[in-house]
Image (spheres, grey):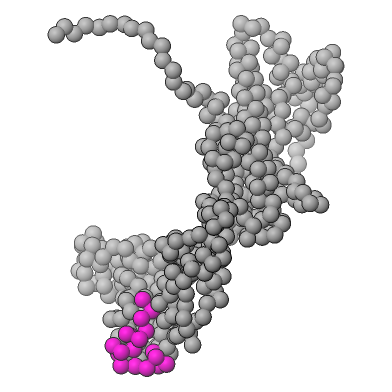
Amino acid sequence: MVIKQRLDQRQVQKLVMVPSLQQAIKLLTLTNLELVEVINQELSLNPMLEAEGETGEDQDLTTSKEEKEASVEAESDELDTFFQEYFDNEFKPVYQEEKEAISLENIASRAFSLWDHLNWQASLTFFTEQDKEIAQHIIGNITEDGFLETSGEEIARQLGVPSKKVDQIRQKIMRFDPVGVGSLDFREALLTQYDYYYGQDPLIRMIIKKYLPLLEKLDYHQLAQEINLSLEELKKKIDMIRQLNPTPGRKYSQERVSYVVPDIIVVKEDDNYRIDLNNEGLPRLRINRYYQNLLRKQDETSDSYLFLRERLKKAQWFLRSLDQRNQTIYKVADYIVKKQKDFLDKGIDFLQPLTLNEIAQKIGVHESTVARVVTNKYIQTPRGVFPLKYFFHRSLTSREGEEISSLRIKDKIRKLIAQEDRDNPLSDGEIAEILSRENYKIARRTVAKYRIQLGFEPSHLRKRKYLMEE
């Protein structure tokens, strides 16, 4: 077999994503807050772009060509005059008295973290260098829930100290505030808290130590038999256990509240709904006239001409991508509002099933484009603020052939469980039978799946829970 090199020419078809297309796709997924950052970055990189108001009052777009050129020349003269005046020997700049600004660090507020709180307590408890080092190592390995994620033996090996010494330090930390922090599991955390706050009932210690699996299953009858106690007495002890915190570190968790800025605003006008894109805070962009006119005066072979022409092309593509983004979001929102008009008027019982493919076919785009549009977008309606993904869900079919939203079925299951007889809670099969009598065609396993998604226990666990509550 002879190996040789050969040059062939072939014609093939393939999809190439040009930079402009990539930019348009990227803009689709951005929220308004993220879009502001992208626009500001583009403004800083491209002199051909400007935000309205940057160069004074907006000029009349019907200005004649001669007036535009005269305006540009006047701007150039003003610019030259400014710099000439600046370098004039007789020019005396005016200085204002500088005042020391207040440091932002002095007015900024920062939440006190769990680790800050523990280290502060450790500094008041441990005084030898070895104890301080062990305490800092233990605290540094505590999770947000308050549990030690590294064993005491591992810490002792890393620091070269006896395991017994590490455990002594950890036992002291476990009695810091919040009590139970530094425990190896939630059983140890509960025992530490009970011993610290109460510690008088050996039965409660035994329940925590040996019978937590029965508590998790809500099997109170079996638990009562195991410890030879009546249900009434058992309930008192369980109420005591419920006052303990299985995740002590959460007391100091720095959970952030997320404020939603709607991208689309729906307003009801008479019997119809008006859709507005929320452009509040977004700069209004336009092509910079000064550089556009400067481009016309440049020699086509000069570097400045090539540079400005390239920036002009990028600016036009960016403006076109923004406009395409707005149009696509509007089309998607418009179809959702028309499809869900009964929901907006009457409530969740009238919510219609909707898929990405359905909208894609109606507005003439690919399904992936719709998926990008609904990502991280929120819509403000008279019924509240919803993520756009809220309206996309599978459909079920009634016995009359009507398509029903799965959210409507979940809402009915929630109401049935809320109104059920506490002595005889509804099983999944009974719920499916009730829905069937209401012409909702749904299987028992589907009911079970929706019940789990709603966060409800099976009927036998709900019955045990109701008994203890009574």
Q: Nearer the viewer, residue 373 or 46?
A: 373
Instruction: Where is residue 161? Give x, y as percent.
Output: 21, 66
Q: In which quarter of the image is the N terminus?
A: top left
Residue 174 visible in image: no
Residue sitting at x 39%, y 68%: 146
Instruction: Where is residue 368? Give x, y as percent.
Output: 51, 37
* The magenta stretch spans residue 223: yes
Instruction: Where is residue 102? Give x, y as percent.
Output: 65, 53
Residue sitting at x 46%, y 64%: 447
* The magenta stretch spans residue 273: no
Q: Which residue lies furthest to the left in this view?
A: 1
Residue sitting at x 52%, y 51%: 394
Q: Nearer the viewer, residue 97 or 71?
A: 71
Image height of 301 relative to 362, above or below = above
Magenta segment's dominant SS is: helix
Image height of 305 relative to 235, above or below = above
Q: In this view, does 135 lie to the left or right of 26?
A: left
Residue 90 sits in quarter: top right
- In the image, the segment drawn in magenta is 217-234
Residue 219 visible in image: yes
Instruction: Where is residue 392? Give x, y as percent.
Output: 56, 49
Residue 50 sits in quarter: top right
